[in-house]
Image (cartoon, grey):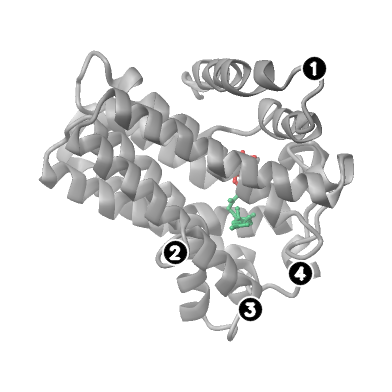
Amino acid sequence: MNEYLDLINKNIVTYLDNNLYQHNEPVHEAVPVTNAIKYSIENGGKRLRPTLCLLAGELSGNEDYIDKCMPYCLALEFIHTYSLIHDDLPAMDNDDLRRGKPTVHKQFDECIAILAGDGLLNLAYEVLLDNISKNPTEANIRASKIISSCSGIVSGMVKGQVLDMYQASNTKETLDNINTYKTGALIHASVLSGAVANGLSENEIKSLYEYSIILGKAFQIADDILDVTGSVEELGKNIGSDAKNNKTTYASLFGVEGAKVILEELEAEAIGKLSIFGSRAKKLVELTKYLTSRNN
Ligand code: GRG
């Protein structure tokens, strides 16, 4: 499905080899943390956020869209992986399996897991700033700011995680608000960073903005359904985590079948937002269908 998977994985490994490990080998005190970063990021992960970034960039028709997207791909996957490590901690969702392996705090310890997440977050900003210093364009500054605000406390993923940890009520409105920030914001940043960095028109960016908001919502609903119906083998993480943590989800509010109907409607709505791109958006349409019908 994902023609970009190998390319993204190769770039992640090369970046970490060049910027992290060789400076820490063999006796640097931070070796356990770099090992935990390697452990968490190098095996597994669907690389959906980098893929969305590349597919949005590809819409530009630029020959060098991959080069323009790659710093964002790395930053997005670093931030996403840090968020998974921290989300799995005992103070948050307290999970012991992720990407088919023991979570970082189980494999190493809690201190290492916290620091590995912190390290990944900082690496993300190093990549973005390095890119800006090499290519100081308005587009790169704007795309980097989108990633930073979508990851943060005012209107990003950290805000969503706070809302999720302290769910104020179990209504659909509360849930939608949590999902918009916790899951949707980084998906939104993935699509928009690729689009902005590649100079898509404001009209095209607006359509992709609307698309990404709907996609983020659909992605989380698919995740809610899989937490009930999925298998540990396919997901690489424990199922039933939402029920265990008394989380309200689309599956608990509407039942699995009800959530599936809503998901289908959102899929159609999201794809509709891509119509201005015509056949150029074929791959993005395919990815959207995969994301809403995925089993992992
Ligand atoms: C700790 C600040 C902070 C935020 C955590 C990631 C997150 C926010 C919460 C995880 C809870 C969760 C399961 C959210 C659903 C959406 C999601 C992020 C799923 C995992 O992403 P995938 O399926 O995972 O893209 P892979 O492993 O394929 O990268």
Q: Which residue is mark 2?
A: 180
Please tell me which residue is depicted at 60% across the width and 39% down the height of the picture: 120
Q: Earlier in the sequence, mark 3 or mark 2?
A: 3
Q: Is residue 107 above or below residue 283?
A: below
Q: Is residue 61 above or below residue 155?
A: above
* CA gap, disc 3 and disc 2: 15 Å
Q: Earlier in the sequence, mark 2 or mark 4?
A: 2
Q: Earlier in the sequence, mark 2 or mark 1?
A: 1
Of tags 2 and 4, the one toward the viewer is: 2
Q: Nearer the viewer, residue 135 or 165?
A: 135
Q: Which residue is mark 4?
A: 243
Mark 2 C-beta to ligand 1 under 8 Å: no
Q: Is residue 288 visible?
A: yes
* CA gap, disc 4 and disc 3: 15 Å
Please tell me which residue is depicted at 34% across the width and 18% down the height of the picture: 67
Residue 26 disc label: 1
* CA gap, disc 3 and disc 1: 42 Å
* CA gap, disc 1 and disc 4: 44 Å
